[in-house]
């Protein structure tokens, strides 16, 4: 219950019906309308009005339309979809590896019932803390990534020590758990690459300049 999908009224009211999809679509409108989009639309309207007011007319090849609008839009949509799929794959791999660590502690431990149950609770608490830290890192701006990553790496260290402590009598299985932790770190770095490294600034600047200047030229 710690990581439920949502606690809003619309989620429970339309969890299985079309109402939820409609409300979710409406909630995404502020994320796709920004000052940049308003500025681009304003440039197009002002440029059209200025040309009509001053009697400026001419013809323009559609090749410029494909370069100024189609190419930036196709590139942005394709790149955004690919980034989303990469992020979901990396985060899903991270969660699967953490779940595998918990299963290893639960099923491979040679402790008694009571002690084994306590070991599961301890490892589960550490895993929940790690997931909370990773989610907080992914949702935070990049300027805070150093302190967020320090907390995440420290939590990985705690998990590694705990796994070694719980499986001290089974070195081969402990080695397998540490291998899962190593793979989880790789998945975390993949999430980090998707989050922190985006389109090169030169290409982004070219696309922005084309979209902003195109309304005046057209």
Image: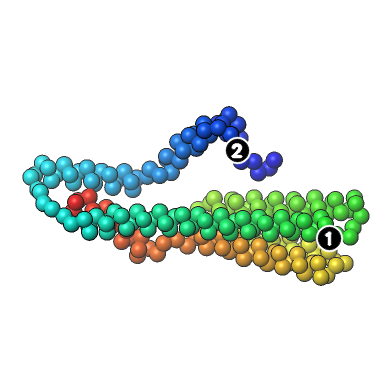
Q: Nearer the viewer, residue 62 or 94?
A: 62
In x, y percent, where is residue 103? 77, 56
Is residue 143 in view from this perspective?
no
Q: Is residue 19 above or below residue 198?
A: above
Is residue 3 in view from this perspective?
yes
Question: Which mark is nearer the camera, 2 or 1?
Answer: 1
Q: Residue at x 52, y 56 (%)?
A: 85
* Residue assigned mark 1: 108
Q: Quadrant of the N terminus?
A: top right
Q: Residue furthest right?
A: 112
Q: Residue at x 47, y 62 (%)?
A: 197
Q: Residue at x 48, y 34 (%)?
A: 22
Which image quarter: residue 54? top left
Q: What label does residue 6 carry, if any?
A: 2
Tell me the element at label 2: loop
In x, y percent, where is residue 16? 58, 34
Do the CB atoms of the residues marked 2 and 1 lie less than 8 Å apart?
Answer: no
In x, y percent, where is residue 207? 32, 58
């Amino acid at each position: 219950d710690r990581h439920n999908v949502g606690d809003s009224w619309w989620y429970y009211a339309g969890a299985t019906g079309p109402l939820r999809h409609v409300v979710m679509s409406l909630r995404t409108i502020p994320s796709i309308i920004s000052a940049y989009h308003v500025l681009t639309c304003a440039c197009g309207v002002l440029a059209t009005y200025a040309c009509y007011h001053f009697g400026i007319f001419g013809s323009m090849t559609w090749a410029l339309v494909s370069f100024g609008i189609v190419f930036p839009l196709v590139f942005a949509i394709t790149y955004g979809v690919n980034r989303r799929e990469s992020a979901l794959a990396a985060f899903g791999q991270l969660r699967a590896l953490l779940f595998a660590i918990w299963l290893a502690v639960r099923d491979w431990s040679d402790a008694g019932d009571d002690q084994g149950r306590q070991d599961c609770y301890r490892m589960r608490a550490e895993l929940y803390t790690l997931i909370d830290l990773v989610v907080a890192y992914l949702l935070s701006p990049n300027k805070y990534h150093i302190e967020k990553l320090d907390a995440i790496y420290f939590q990985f260290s705690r998990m590694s020590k705990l796994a070694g402590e719980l499986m001290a009598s089974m070195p081969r299985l402990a080695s397998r758990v540490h291998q899962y932790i190593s793979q989880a770190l790789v998945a975390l770095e993949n999430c980090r690459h998707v989050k922190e490294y985006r389109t090169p600034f030169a290409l982004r600047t070219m696309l922005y300049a084309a979209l902003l200047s195109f309304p005046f030229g057209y």
